[in-house]
Image (tube, rainbow, N blue to C red):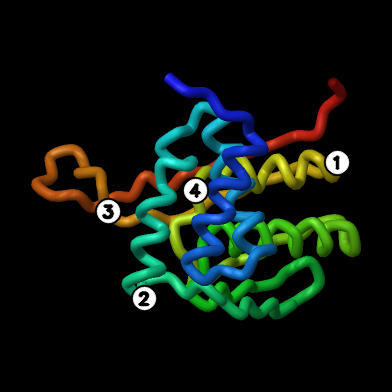
Amino acid sequence: MPQFSADKLVEFCKNLIKGAGVPEEDAAVVADVLVDTSLEGLDTHGISRLPIYLSRIQNGRINPQADMKVERTAPGLATVDGDNGLGQLVGVRSMQVAIELAGETGMGAVAAKHSNHYGASSYYCKMAASSDMLGMAFTNTPAGITPWGGKKAYFGTNPIAFAFPGKN
């Protein structure tokens, strides 16, 4: 089986995403999230998702040139409107805003809307930890789990992740 360096995979993914109409800087962010996630061993949320995202861009289900809007709603609180863009971009921007708010007020919480599948929550938590902050990221999901005694899926998996800064 051929092996590729992480840098080569990021470049490959970035070029595919850019080819679908995503600006180069945004494509680089998404590619980094996908490759980092695969390197973590979470292949179901890493580069294996790329064909799905590209297809959704091509059929108009994801906005390749989203114009995200940040609204500060109170000290330490904000919302990010993702303009139906790639979820990784919305996730990264949301955590950037949360880190910025936490630097100002001691705590930052951001709610994102109008986004798409954002991959593994761990990436966003690692952003906070690398800024010497506690991080928490979570998202909703469609119904996929049948409650005990039920006949159809009702609950989502609703992933949640935490990160804590530490010394290496």
Q: Nearer the viewer, mark 2 or mark 1?
A: 2
x%, y% of residue 36? 61, 38
- What amino acid does circle 1 point to? Asp
The residue at which mark 4 appears reads as: 119
Q: Measuring 58% from the left and 76% from the top, which residue is drawn there? A: 81
Q: Secondary structure at mark 2?
A: loop
The numbered dot on residue 132 is 1
Q: CA distance from mark 2 to mark 1?
A: 38 Å
x%, y% of residue 31? 59, 50
Looking at this view, is 56 or 7 the one in front? 7
Would you call the spot at circle 3 few (<14 residues within 10 Å), some (14-19), or many (20 or more)?
few
Q: Is residue 161 visible?
A: no
Please, which residue is most extreme toward the left here? 151
x%, y% of residue 140? 43, 56
The numbered dot on residue 30 is none
Q: Secondary structure at mark 4?
A: loop
The residue at which mark 3 appears reads as: 143
